[in-house]
Image (tube, rainbow, N blue to C red):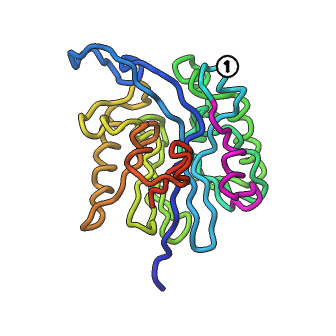
């Protein structure tokens, strides 16, 4: 049977202004002046072959407010705008357990939750409470993941895992112990949802690691894996960075009257 193709949407739900020195590790080594860098926050929706797959679940407005982020369209409201009821979602992929990817994770009553075994084990283990890690996660979200795991609703993976025909997860680590990227057979060709394996396109283009990482060498290796995945077909694959505002200009708006809400990347 032919491999099903999927619609892939990148949905922008929040934003903030940061500094280059905040987002790139050891920014001073590049000999560049500091500058303002916009950081956008996305989740991703994959639909096709009778499946509705949500990749990450954003943060709640309350968490965003506490962290100085501007919520533009909270994920539940954004999903409603896209015509998705939480009960329609059959799979939720958590690419990693940072606060901006795990909010609302308990709102999907029928969904199988898929996460790296290494990732979940780390965030429910002893080192997650250390300050350099703890500031990046929300305890309530981790508690929800722990509860869902106890209820048997979580699928833990290692290495590579096929979620559905044409949707594959690849564990790369680096940014977090079990960071995942998602390779999708999309309607317009292959798509690599890099999530936070690549926050900004400059990370790939300039080999410039993000400021937050669990394993720097693994982060560099993740860049190499994403580059390899981007070359999976003769025409190449579309790479979708996790926080780069350029995502909104590289791809086609879902709604031409509101081009910064969501884009079709496949």
Q: Position of residue 92 (x, y in %)?
A: 64, 53
What range of the chain is rendered magenta?
71-89
Q: Is residue 208 left or right of residue 142?
A: left
Q: Mark 1 = which residue? A: 66
Q: Is residue 167 above or below residue 206?
A: below
Which quarter of the picture shows residue 232?
A: bottom left
Q: Is residue 76 magenta?
A: yes
Q: Position of residue 103 (x, y in %)?
A: 68, 37
Q: Is residue 209 magenta?
A: no
- In the image shown, does 25 or 242 lie closer to the viewer? 242
Q: Is residue 171 left or right of residue 91?
A: left
Q: Secondary structure at mark 1?
A: helix
Which quarter of the picture shows residue 52?
A: bottom right
- Asked if residue 113 shows in the view, the reply is yes
Furthest-front residue in this view? 257
Q: Is residue 263 left or right of residue 239?
A: right
- Asked if residue 116 shows in the view, the reply is no
Which quarter of the picture shows residue 265?
A: bottom left
Q: Position of residue 253 (x, y in %)?
A: 49, 52
- In the image shown, does 193 or 35 lie closer to the viewer? 35
Q: Position of residue 258 (x, y in %)?
A: 56, 45
Q: Is residue 259 above or below residue 265?
A: above
- In the image shown, does 80 or 144 lie closer to the viewer? 80
User: Which residue: 55% across, 68% down?
Assistant: 164
């Amino acid at each position: 049977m032919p491999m099903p193709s999927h619609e892939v949407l990148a949905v922008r739900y929040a934003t903030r202004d940061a500094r280059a020195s905040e987002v790139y590790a050891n920014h001073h080594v590049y000999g560049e002046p500091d500058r303002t860098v916009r950081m956008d926050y996305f989740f991703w929706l994959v639909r096709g072959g009778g499946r509705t797959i949500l990749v990450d679940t954003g943060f709640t407005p309350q968490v965003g407010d506490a962290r100085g982020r501007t919520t533009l369209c909270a994920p539940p409201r954004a999903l409603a705008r896209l015509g998705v009821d939480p009960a329609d979602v059959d799979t939720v992929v958590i690419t990693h357990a940072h606060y901006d990817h795990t909010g609302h994770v308990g709102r999907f009553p029928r969904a199988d939750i898929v996460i790296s075994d290494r990732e979940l084990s780390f965030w429910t283990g002893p080192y997650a409470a250390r300050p350099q890690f703890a500031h990046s996660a929300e305890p309530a979200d981790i508690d929800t993941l722990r509860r869902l795991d106890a209820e048997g609703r979580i699928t833990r993976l290692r290495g590579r895992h096929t979620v559905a025909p044409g949707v594959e997860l690849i564990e790369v680590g680096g940014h977090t112990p079990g960071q995942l990227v998602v390779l999708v057979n999309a309607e317009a060709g292959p798509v690599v949802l890099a999530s936070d394996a690549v926050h900004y396109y400059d990370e790939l283009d300039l080999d410039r690691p993000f400021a937050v990482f669990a394993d720097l060498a693994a982060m560099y290796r993740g860049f190499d894996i994403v580059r390899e995945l981007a070359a999976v077909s003769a025409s190449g694959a579309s790479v979708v960075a996790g926080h780069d505002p350029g995502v909104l200009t590289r791809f086609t708006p879902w709604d031409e009257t509101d081009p910064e809400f969501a884009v079709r990347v496949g």
